[in-house]
Image (cartoon, rainbow, N blue to C red):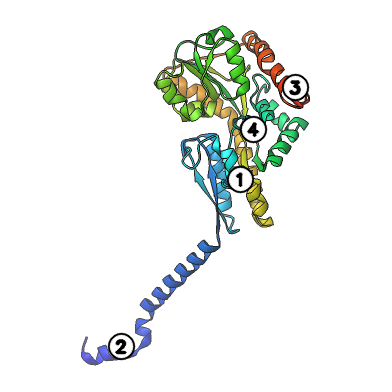
Amino acid sequence: MNKNENRNRNRNPMARAPRAGLRALVALALALAAATAQGERVLRASHQWPGGKGDIRDEMVQIIAREVNAAGVGLRVQVYPGKSLYKPKEQWGAMVKGRLDISAFPLAYAGGRHPEFNLTLMPGLVKNHEHAARLNRSEFMRRIRRIIEDAGVVVLADTWLAGGFVSKKKCVLWPRDVHGQRFRAAGKAFNQMLAAAGASINSMPSSEIYSALQTGVLDGANTSSSSLVSYRIYEQVRCLTAPGEYTLWFMYEPILMSKKTFDSLTPAQRLVVMKAAGKAEQYAYEHAKQEDERLVRVYREHGVQVVFMNREQFEAWRRIAEKASYRRFAEEVKGGRELLDLALSVK
């Protein structure tokens, strides 16, 4: 290029337009992104289970996050799995105070503050997944949700999960099988039942079962099908008593939101959150049975013996639970008899 051509190019503004235009577009995009980020509210969602490992509760929270994040209503959900933000039992108080926005939370973990919640992990109270769905529509659950909301928390999605027993020593079928074993049970009612059957009790979140079994603190435990897989507990046990036709263990593990957070959302944001929660709840209902099937498959693949309770064994446990757990709940909890009867009336 000669000097005249170079001078003519410098005088022509169109010669520099493509590069200048690109810089201007980039600057505009960055400015818009910054403005969006400044105007977007971020909600923190916490739970105790591993993220991205197929755990049904993690997936429910992830569904809500994906739906909300894509809705364009100035709201984004950031998920903190694996108790990376709050310890499991700390989440309830954090939601009540408005410090935590969303949690996948086993409600019986808050049974110390609200003893009525212990009914949502009562041995033999829920018969199967279809029965759990009927309970969700009952007066019993309406009262439980009222207590939750009065405490400062809102239910976004209902979830009932089945579970089973695991042991390093022997298969748990009859009450006598836990005698002398050091056991972990989620919730007061299961602790009472197992203690009445002769087990010694160590209380801890399900996220601590693996290490407790590994170090000899525990001989056995019961928890949900999802947790039994997500935490790889099959690496530490000899036998699994899986949920089946006669399932002793069912737990209410809803997705919850701080009422302070919920009340502060715009109507459009509330609508998006509730629609997303509806999708998460439907996912959980459709996949809960599959979690039980996956539990059996995974444990057999890892060489763990798998057994199922029959009716006679289930009834033997239920008789102990009625004396050790049902009766005590009715006597110790204000309004407990009425609430228990409401739950038992759902067939």
Which residue is rendered at x = 62% and y = 41% of the image? 256
Discs 1, 3 touching: Cβ within 8 Å: no
Residue for badge 3 = 344
Discs 4, 2 touching: Cβ within 8 Å: no
Instruction: Check disc 3 and give the amino acid type.
Output: Leu
SS assignment at label 3: helix
Q: Is residue 265 visible?
A: yes
Measured Cα–Cα span from mark 1 to mark 4: 14 Å
Residue 236 lies left or right of residue 337; in this view the side is left
SS assignment at label 2: helix
Residue for badge 4 = 113
Horizontal and vertical percent for residue 79?
51, 45
Residue for badge 2 = 10
Q: Quadrant of residue 111?
A: top right
Instruction: Check disc 1 and give the amino acid type.
Output: Lys
Choose the circle earlier in sequence order: 3 or 4. 4
Choose the circle earlier in sequence order: 4 or 2. 2
Badge 3: how crowded within 10 Å, few (<14), some, or many (20+)? few
Measured Cα–Cα span from mark 3 to mark 2: 87 Å
Measured Cα–Cα span from mark 1 to mark 3: 33 Å
